[in-house]
Amino acid sequence: MYQMAKAYYDVTYKTYYNDRIKPVQFRGKESHPLYVQATFDRRTIFFKSYYFELFRQKKYDSQGPTPAQIEKFEDRVIDYIIARNTDRFSLDLLLYEYKLYSADVLDTFEKPFLEWLAGCLRGEHLPGLAATIAQGTEEFLAIQLWDDLKASLQPDLVSRIEEKAVRETEPYYLLAAFVRYKYPKGPFCLPCHEWKLEDENHYPVTDAAAEEFFDDTLWRENIRVDILDLIRKVHLMMFRDVGRRYGK
């Protein structure tokens, strides 16, 4: 729960499992959907948890967060939105920015990555494998498919694809590497607010951990990433994806 500094601008929120709605499947078990209740200026709103809906997909069964971790995801994004809007907060603004800043960057870029990877495999004269990868799967994350491919393909082919990913600043590949660096024990998720979209002057930026990873860690490994190009791609795709999903 979060409370703003000025007493007459109190805003509170909580997550809860909505037992007025029939249960859904979550990790092979039934669970009532997770919702968020927010109150501000004598008005209360209720909305679905983005992260509950995201992580109940089958592909997260083996690598997804626990219910307690999902609630922490909700706390972090809502606290972030409240803190950045102390002078102009409203529940309508909360709903709008929640749609933007809660979004998982990796989930947004997953399908484009599979299409990109399929193109690489077609270029290596592996059309059957390319077609299979392009279709994707509901059972596994794209990074898991790539892990399996790396174990089965010739090392020189793997190297060519990875070099191409860096050279072309392929977002999912690079962001997945960053998330594994930042959260080696999981969960495999990169909320948009943790990859900051812009600073107060509306210039694309990212966080300190990302700068350390791309500018320092990869530099020591002689991997050169065009970080500005990556930031721009993420910035443009996230706004576009939110608009597409919510009709903006």
Image (spheres, helix red, strand yellow):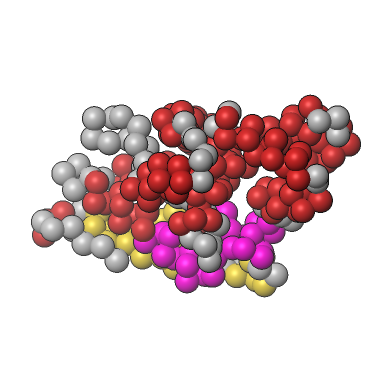
Q: Where is residue 162 in the image (x, y as percent from the top left)?
A: 65, 39
Q: Nearer the viewer, residue 20 or 24?
A: 24
Q: Where is residue 67 in the image (x, y as percent from the top left)?
A: 52, 69
Q: Is residue 220 visible?
A: yes
Q: Which residue is drawn at 36% across and 58% down?
A: 76
Quarter of the rendering containing residue 1: bottom left
Magenta range is 53-75
Q: Give the prevailing secondary structure in the magenta stretch.
A: helix
Apparent side of residue 50 relative to residue 158 in the rendered image (left or right): left
Q: Can residue 131 be seen in this view?
A: no
Apparent side of residue 197 relative to residue 4 in the rendered image (left or right): right
Q: Position of residue 163 (x, y in %)?
A: 63, 35
Is residue 88 depicted above or below 179 in this figure?
Answer: above
Q: Is residue 241 magenta?
A: no
Q: Residue at x 69, y 59 (%)?
A: 58
Is residue 95 depicted above or below 225 in this figure?
Answer: below
Q: Nearer the viewer, residue 124 or 46?
A: 124
